[in-house]
Image (cartoon, rainbow, N blue to C red):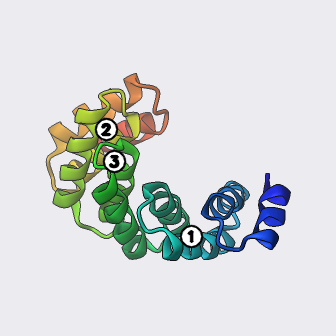
Amino acid sequence: MKKNATQELEINPNNTDALYDRAYVMYVWNEYKKAIADLTLAIKIDPTKGDFYSIRADCKSSLSDYRGALLDFSEAIKIDPQVYKNLNGRGAAKYFLGRYKEAISDFDKSIIINPENSYGYLIRGLANIKLNKIENGCIDLSKAGELGEQRAYSRIKEFCN
């Protein structure tokens, strides 16, 4: 896919589909800075695609740029507020920035959209624990584990017993 996208960009450097495709491959290969560069150009050309912001936000999160990720996830949510993964991403960015109440709010929304959202329960649980709401946090961690989130059990052992 990368080779075809790169070839297409040689012909048409403003092809946002090719920019996205190449950026996605870079994201999968953990080449986050290269992916961000392509996505930034794609956003300049067409700022109406939520996926451009979402993948760029994931790249920024992977580089621990949580403030940048928060901004991009917020843009993606403005475009399509029903994508629970964007709410998860923004909630995680808020969690890592210590904004636990705001993170919980995003995870509440993402869990309403997708009740099988194990990651949403995991991080919402950890945010509740950070706010000293141990019981709520442990219930969420248990639900995350039930839904297949294996990291939940080490957190339960750490915080709930």
Instruction: Tell me: residue 133, above or below residue 91.
Output: above
Q: Quadrant of residue 40?
A: bottom right
Label pair 1/2, CB-CB below 8 angstroms: no
Real-space CA distance between mark 1 and mark 3, rounded to the nearest whole angstrom: 31 Å
Q: Is residue 117 left or right of residue 2?
A: left
Q: Residue at x 40, y 46 (%)?
A: 85
Q: Distance between the residues labelled 3 and 2?
A: 6 Å
Q: Mark 1 or 2, which is nearer the eye?
A: 1
First in sequence: mark 1 vs mark 3:
1
Give the amino acid at mark 3: Ile
State the mark number for residue 8: none
3D distance between C-alphas at marks 1 and 2: 33 Å
What percent of the width, then of the height, locates residue 11?
Answer: 80, 70
Q: Name the residue under label 1.
A: 42
Residue assigned mark 3: 123
Q: Can residue 93 be seen in this view?
A: no
The residue nearer to you, when weighing 78 against 149, is: 78
Q: Residue furthest front?
A: 11
Label annotation for residue 121: 2
Would residue 87 be found to the left or right of residue 145 on screen? left
Q: Are marks 3 and 2 in contact (CB under 8 Å)?
A: yes
Q: Dot 1, how many residues are within 10 Å of its Cα: few (below 14), some (14-19), or many (20+)?
A: many
